[in-house]
Image (tube, rainbow, N blue to C red):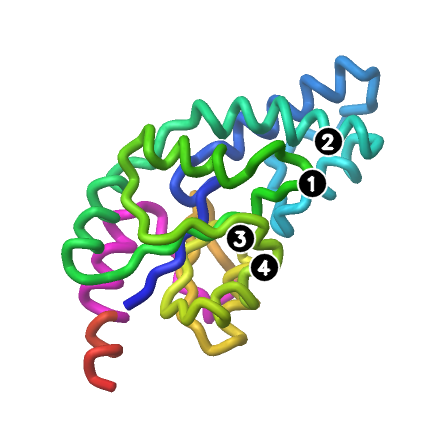
Amino acid sequence: MRIGIDIDDTLTDIKDKLTNAAKEYAISLNKNVKNKNHKIVDIYNNGNIYQKLFDFSYDELKYFLGTIQEEITNNALPRNDCVDIIKKLHKEGHEIYIITARDSEFHKDPYIQSETWLNKNSIYFDKLIVNAKDKAKVCVENNIDILIDDSISNCSCVYNCGIEAIMISNEKNSNNEIKTFYNWKEIYNYIKNGVANEKNKK
């Protein structure tokens, strides 16, 4: 099978750090951060949630995403077990496509940034795709069998295209159509015992 895998908050777990960094940056700009104590989830992968919550201008948003966020993502550690499990999936014959929404609008070179982090952390991949704002379209174009992502929006769009979607999250997901797991061991067991078996029957 060809497995598509997101990077931010899928291979990593950085929501808390990004939330705190966004608040600190907003405070430094004298923005109103009252009643904004919840964890920020950028479900559309475009930074709009930060702009909306903290009234960032375009230039302020660009600095946050291109400098502050990038420093966090560049130094993030992989989630537990994901490195070994991806290697195992590769050895079992699956193709690994890394698919990220990191884009050229807010990042100097999203491909090099992503490739450098993946190589530094020994994460195997057959292909790296950046600027993937529409992950459903990218998955269809690249014949992806399964997408693993932290965004319910991405997973739902992919699922609606007839592609298996697996969501990794630290919280419960109310959408029963999307398989949700809390860690990479659970994801591996599902692929090994669930999806892979169904694919082999066809």
The CA distance from mark 2 to mark 4 is 23 Å
**Identity, as a three-letter code, of the amino acid under mark 1:** Glu
Of the image marks 3 and 1, the number of the one nearer the N terminus: 1
Of the image marks 2 and 1, the number of the one nearer the N terminus: 2
Q: Nearer the viewer, mark 3 or mark 1?
A: 1
Q: Does residue 194 belong to the magenta stretch? A: yes
**Identity, as a three-letter code, of the amino acid under mark 3:** Ser
Residue bounds of the magenta highlight = 175-195
Q: Secondary structure at mark 4?
A: helix
* Quarter of the image where the C terminus is located: bottom left
Mark 2 = which residue? 62
Q: Which mark is residue 154?
A: none
Q: Nearer the viewer, mark 1 or mark 4?
A: 1
Mark 4 = which residue? 153
The CA distance from mark 1 to mark 4 is 21 Å
* Quarter of the image where the N terminus is located: bottom left
Mark 3 = which residue? 151
Q: Secondary structure at mark 3?
A: loop
**Identity, as a three-letter code, of the amino acid under mark 4:** Ser
Q: Nearer the viewer, mark 2 or mark 1?
A: 1
Q: Position of residue 110 (x, y in %)?
A: 55, 38
Viewer-proximal residue among 5 and 183: 5
Name the residue located 81 percent from the left edge and 34 percent from the top edge. 58
